[in-house]
Image: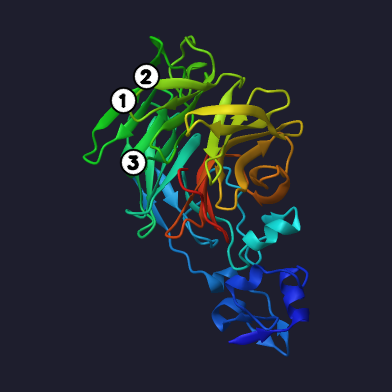
Amino acid sequence: MFYLNDQTRRALCRRPARCNVFRECGVRGGRAIASPASAGILRSGVIMAMSRRTIMGAGSALAATAGIAVTGRTASAAAPADGDDFKPSQRYPDPAVRALDPSFEKYMIFFAAVERVATGDTRYTEGPVWFGDGRYLLWSDIPNNRILKWEEETKAVSVFRAPANYANGNTRDRQGRLVTAEHGRRITRTEYDGTITVLIDRFDGKRLNSPNDVVVASDNSIWFTDPPFGISGNYSGDKAPAELPNNVYRLDPAGKATVVAGDVAAPNGLCFSPDEKILYVVDSRSTPVSIRAYDVVDGLTKLANGRVFFTCEAGESPDGIRCDVDGNLWCAYGAVKEGIDGVLVLSPAGKRIGHIALPERPANLCFGGRKRNRVFMTTGRAVYSLYVNTQGALGG
């Protein structure tokens, strides 16, 4: 093992001495510990450039059935898609991961970087959901009307379901079953044997608009947003007139639905705080675009005290959102202006504290991996991931 002095640590990580990101490579008595395999070559107390080709070997495979290339973190990985502009960092720390506030530094892992785990002929992907029991990720390719599957162990990508009724958001209920918000105007649950149960497709006798995102609370109630995005054209659904206002709904375990929020112009992503005392909802058509927060009251049955939690700058917009165990809000975020596409992390107070830059705008994200400390981010053309020093809250 090599022991890095403070001067070398600063040269390596460009962070002040207070940085505690080195917990991942060890900190003992103010000295960062790094192994030869992960720290590169040390000569005369000077760290040579750490090539990530040396640190991380990456294989590649092609899943023909899905048309998706599984990529590693090396330049020799699977052939890039047309117009590919993903440039993996060859050095640690990855400059794509930035602390906008010192409070975010504890969530950054020095030897972790943005990875692209799959890319291919997708058009606009959404709704990642992690299945730890099977070590795989599912996500929706809405215009292609399918759900895709990536296996952590083999890196194989396949079509999980096609057609998929224009599936958008996905989550798991507390029994581990897949729950899907479908632009085909319904919420469904996939049973253990693979059959599909329609949980709701109408409210007050009228068809739902195009359910967008969905979460499940600890009491097994299902909460979902219902904007008209999927029926406004024929690209990500079937064009049709809206029959209902743009609502946020709660579906109780007995199958009764209620409107819990009707004051959101266009409800999009949603998630609970870790203690389920707050529900966050993205309003994609407020001016400016915002994230709203509501107190969850009356035993997880109603919302109260709706207010603006975060206001976006001009040209910026979040989509899918998830909370970590500390209550920070991780937002799939994009903008017309350059340099914003990626994941924006907000503190529980609504302060910008961190950013993960991606080469294209992400639509959604989830926490996964064996310890729920790997963020998976879906975009138009690919799926990216990053290990972080926190875990996703349950229910997302």
On residue 198, the disc is: 1
Which SS class for mark 1? strand
- Give the Cα separation between the discs numbered 2 and 3: 25 Å
Please give the name of the residue rendered at 55% of the width and 74% of the height, measured from the top-left corner: 54
Q: State the image quarter where residue 270 is shown.
A: top right
Return the x and y of residue 139 as percentages of the image width and height: 43, 41
Amino acid at the residue labelled 2: Asp
Instruction: Judge depth for marks 2 and 3 and give the one in front.
Output: 2
301 relative to 66, above or below: above
Circles 2 and 3: CB atoms closer than 8 Å: no
Residue corresponding to mark 2? 201
Which SS class for mark 3? strand
Which SS class for mark 2? loop
Return the x and y of residue 375 as percentages of the image width and height: 53, 52
Please give the name of the residue rendered at 49% of the width and 34% of the height, measured from the top-left corner: 123
21 relative to 384, above or below: below
- Give the Cα separation between the discs numbered 1 and 2: 7 Å
Q: How many marks?
A: 3
Nearest to N terminus: mark 3 or mark 1: 3
Amino acid at the residue labelled 3: Val
Instruction: Judge depth for marks 3 and 1 and give the one in front.
Output: 1
Bin the neighbour count of mark 2 within 10 Å (Cα to Cα): few under 14, some 14-19, many 20 and up: some
Nearest to N terminus: mark 2 or mark 3: 3
In this image, 99 relative to 62: left or right?
A: right
Circles 1 and 2: CB atoms closer than 8 Å: yes
